Image (cartoon, rainbow, N blue to C red):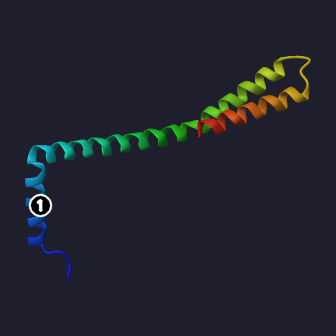
Amino acid sequence: MGISIWQLLIILVIVALLFGTKRLRNIGSDLGNAIRGFKSAVKDGEEGAAAEPELLTRKEADTVTNQSGQSGQSGQSVTDANSVNARDAQSKL
């Protein structure tokens, strides 16, 4: 009860006559390039997300080192620095 091969061939011929083979080839290559670009963007995003916790750990270590080296800093400014780091991490996601 589905679409037979003959019906698909007739539809293909009608589409080829309406759009032309050159235009269909261009549409196919454009669609292929778009899919390829999307896949590479997703792959880059996954690699960036995997490296991000390491980056955050380094930032936190630098912040703690900088804060412990400075004298006369209050506990309030340490809390503010931690909230800024948390906001930066949230904005990167």
Q: Nearer the viewer, residue 58 or 48?
A: 48
Query: Can you name the residue that lies furthest to the front here?
Result: 18
Query: Can you name the residue that lies furthest to the bottom here?
Result: 1
Question: What secondary structure is marked by label 1?
Answer: helix
Q: In the image, is 31 to the left or to the right of 92?
A: left
Residue 82 appears at what percent x and percent y?
77, 33
Q: In the image, is 44 to the left or to the right of 23?
A: right
At label 1, the amino acid type is Leu
Q: Residue at x 65, y 36 (%)?
A: 89
Q: Residue at x 13, y 75 (%)?
A: 4
Q: Nearer the viewer, residue 85 or 15?
A: 15
The residue where tag 1 is placed is: 12
Q: Nearer the viewer, residue 17 or 36?
A: 17
Q: Dot 1: few (<14), some (14–19), or many (≥20) neighbours within 10 Å?
A: few
Q: Image quarter for residue 55?
A: top right
Q: Residue at x 9, y 48 (%)?
A: 20
Question: Is 5 situated above or below 70?
Answer: below
Q: Image quarter for residue 38?
A: top left
Image quadrant where one finds the C terminus = top right
Residue 70 appears at what percent x and percent y?
84, 17
